[in-house]
Amino acid sequence: MSNAAQDSHWECHPVTPDRFEDFGDVINPTRRDTHCWCLSHRLGVKDIEELGGRSRETAMRKLCDRENPPGVLTYRNGEPVGWCSIGPRAEIPRLVVSKLIRPVDAVPVWSIICVVVRSGYRRQGVTEQLLEGAIAYAASRGAPAIEAHPVDPDGRMDTTMAFVGTRTMFERVGFRVIGTTDAVASRMPRLIMRRDL
C-alpha cells in the first residue's frame, strides 16, 4: 500500500438511501439516466420500469432501501472513492439464472459483481480498502463465503471490462481460485474465486 493510502482515513459503508448521492458521485458523476447505475445483474428492463418508473436511478434508489443494500462505498478522508456491488447470490437474478457462471456447491455465497474506483483515485490503494470493506459487510450480514469472478490478465486489461476485477486484486484480500466459469471478459476466462468467512 502506498504512503498516501497508509496516511489516509478509510471508512466503508453499505449504500443506504442517505449515501445515494455519494454512490452517484462514484458510479455516475454526470447523472446520466441511461448509464448502467450498476443494475444490469440485479434488474431486467421490465423490473426497472416497474420499480423505477422507467428511471434507472430511481430503481437503484429503491434497491438501496432494501434489507441488504446492493453494495458498499469506500471513503477516503470523507470523500467517496470506491463502489463494490455485493450481495447474496440468491438475490442477484442474473447470477441465479446464469448458465455461464454456475454455483460450484450448495454454500449460500455472497457474490461480488462489480468493483469501481472513482476517476482520479485509481492506483492509490482504494481497491484493497474497498474489498476489505465489502468482506466486512458480508460477514456482518452472516455470509458464510464470498465469491468473485475476475480475470487473470497478463498486463492491463480493457477498461470497459475492468469492473470484474483481476485475480491478483482478490488474492491480496484472501480469495483463492476454486474453478473457472464459462464466461469471458475481454476475451479472457472468468475465474471463480472464493473467500470463506
Image (cartoon, grey):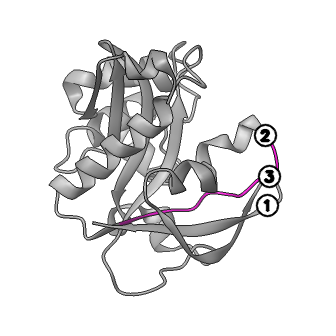
Residue at the spot x=49%, y=52% of the render? 113
The foreground one among 122 and 86 is: 122
Which amino acid, by three-letter code, is at mark 3? Ser
Q: Could you tell me if residue 92 is visible in this image? A: yes
Residue 186: image tag: 3
Q: Which of marks 1 and 2 is in front?
A: 2
CA–CA distance between discs 1 and 2? 12 Å
The foreground one among 88 and 76 is: 76
Residue bearing mark 1 = 188
Specify the quadrant of the image occupied by residue 49. Answer: top left
Find residue 104 and report its horizontal and vertical position in percent: 48, 84
CA–CA distance between discs 3 and 1? 5 Å
Residue 156: image tag: 2
Residue 17: image tag: none
Find residue 17 and report its horizontal and vertical position in percent: 22, 28
Which amino acid, by three-letter code, is at mark 2? Arg
Using a 10 Å C-alpha cutoff, classify the residue at mark 1 as few (fewer than 14 neighbours), some (14 to 19) or many (20 or more).
Answer: few
Residue at the spot x=60%, y=48% of the render? 165
